[in-house]
Amino acid sequence: MGGGGGGDGNWNRLGDVRSLEEKAKAALAGGKRNVFISFATEDMAEVNLLRGQAKNENSDIEFNDHSVREPYDSERADYIKSKITERINRCSVTVVYVSESTAQSRWVQWEVEKSLSLGKRVVATHAGASPASPVPKWLSRPEIKVVPWSKLSGELK
């Protein structure tokens, strides 16, 4: 006579979905890290050089940089902030390039604070053996690790 309602088939499909989800997570874990990079516009040339170096070394870091050239208090600031927020949300981590110009950049400070408020990990990096001084107070927080550029890839794994 028939039927049984097909309950067993649904449980099997649910198991398949979980299995596929685990496989997708494992595949993504081995892929490139989508990184939002925050830096003062004065550091554009140096950041481009470091970004190019990461590509040449077949790094597993993919930078998502959307430089802002408008003043922090411009009429378009709210629109720019909403777009930056979308981009930070799509990334797994925010990297802050630290230089002598960082402390004066209100955009960098805002991006760091927004990243932390969205639950994103923030890593500050610098060229050379030690960061330029002064490191801004808003970067001197226990949840923000500061590493030289040469160790950034390892820190992001």
Image: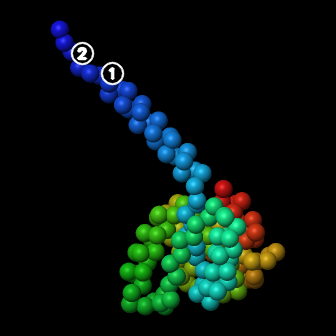
Q: Is residue 36 left or right of residue 155?
A: left
For image coordinates 61% across by 85% down, the residue present is 44
Residue type at numbered disc 2: Gly
Cα–Cα gap, marks 1 and 2: 9 Å
Residue type at numbered disc 1: Asp
Which quadrant of the figure contains the C terminus? Answer: bottom right
For image coordinates 55% across by 45% down, the residue present is 26
Quarter occupied by residue 43? bottom right
State the count of labels.
2
**Residue on which the image places disc 1:** 8
Q: Is residue 149 left or right of residue 74?
A: right
Instruction: In this rendered view, identify the residue nearer to me: 47 or 98.
Output: 47
Where residue 10 appears, x then y in whole percent? 32, 28
Residue 115 can be seen in this image: yes
Where residue 13 appears, x then y in whole percent? 36, 31
For image coordinates 50% across by 84% down, the residue present is 68
Where residue 139 appears, x then y in whole percent? 65, 73
**Residue on which the image places disc 2:** 4
Callout 1 environment at 10 Å: few (<14), some (14 to 19), or many (20+)?
Answer: few
Callout 2 environment at 10 Å: few (<14), some (14 to 19), or many (20+)?
Answer: few
